Image: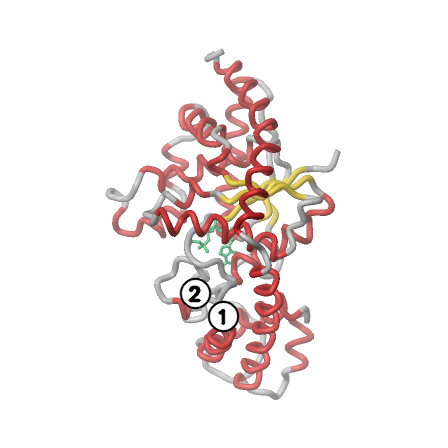
Amino acid sequence: MKPSIFSGVQPSGNLTIGNYIGAISQWVEMQKDYNCLFSVVDYHAITVKQNSDELRKKILEVTKIYLAAGIDLNNSIIFQQSMVAAHTELAWIFNCYGARIADLNKMTQFKDKAGKNQESVSIGLYDYPVLMAADILLYDTDIVPVGEDQQQHVELARDIARRFNNEFGNTFKIPQSVIRKEGARIMSLLDPTKKMSKSDENSNSYIALLDDIEAAKKKIMRAVTDSGSEIIYDPKERPAISNLLTIYAQLGGRQIPRLVKDYTGKGYGEFKKDLAEVVAKFLTGFQKRYYALSDKEVNKILEAGAKKVEKMAAEKMEKVRKVIGVR
Ligand code: AQP
């Protein structure tokens, strides 16, 4: 039996090259060696306000993005989280057994997203990591490939599993996160100290996977740069050019030391022009595959995926309900 992978993306905002480089491209590379489940985690998206028509569209959009990126249904299952009720049931059980308020108070993503409104945001936003723990632990996951920002949530899933197992006997596998060495945190094009985020209000801060190609090129040309003019990789002192080098390396398939060598003595202008072409080439191929997919076939894929995983989830839930004493 191959080890198993679970990961997902929320159908919110405009999926960016950050989501692709940090998470989805890793999934594509790993899918041959693992049993993979990739979920469109729609119940995570509603932790902040969503328009229902938009949400319905986004669920199909994210599924198409997985497929266009190269998720192969011969190796992997794609499914929609809300189609499998066990996720929310297990999250409730973890709310009662395993998760503690002290854990959730430490979550940096909640602090970032809630900002100054911590008292008025939804309880769902606060509890999001517990639902994520349920997503992962439901399927005896070994590996969770994610971007750096999600590592803290995977750590919590591990703690919840350990606590539950201590109380009720061995029920859940302890999963591990896998984070890329390069590209685990792609930064905003406008502020290289901030993560590139698909829900950023300023669309110039990110390159969306479905951006118009010319607009994407302009965003690269307008990306902020550091003071100085050398093309060097130094994330601390030169965060902006280091971020652009990472994007170039990941989408252009040329390693950073090689890029630094190739651009010795050349300026930011020339570098950015070439990077804009690399991004354009990547997006053109990606979007060709994306737009070839129909809503009808994607709906079928999601239904088939839910049927496959429901069986696994039901077996685990039967065991969980028994050990806690409700059956
Ligand atoms: N900038 C990033 N660099 C590398 N990886 C990233 N990920 C997100 N942004 C970057 C990874 O993408 C996966 C899916 O993310 P998510 O939908 O669960 O939401 P998120 O982590 O909150 O990502 P965003 O883009 O910031 O979304 P919004 O703006 O909607 O909150 C995860 O594996 C994540 O690490």
Label 2 – label 1 distance at C-alpha:
7 Å
Q: Which residue is mark 1?
A: 239
Percent across and percent down for residue 203 are 40, 67
Q: Please give the name of the residue rendered at 30% of the width and 41% of the height, measured from the top-left corner.
A: 122
Q: Amino acid at mark 1?
A: Pro
Viewer-proximal residue, 170 or 277?
277
Q: Is residue 261 left or right of residue 244?
A: right
Residue 9 in the image: above or below residue 252: above
**Any mark on residue 193, and which?**
2
Q: Amino acid at mark 2?
A: Thr
Q: How many marks?
A: 2
On whether ligand 1 comes within 8 Å of the CB at mark 1, the answer is: no
Residue beneath the point at 45% across and 70% down: 189
**How does the figure colour the protein chain or chains?**
secondary structure
Q: Which mark is residue 140?
A: none
Residue under the point 70% across and 44% down:
75
Q: Are marks 2 and 1 in contact (CB under 8 Å)?
A: yes
- Identify the mark nearer the N-term, 2 or 1: 2
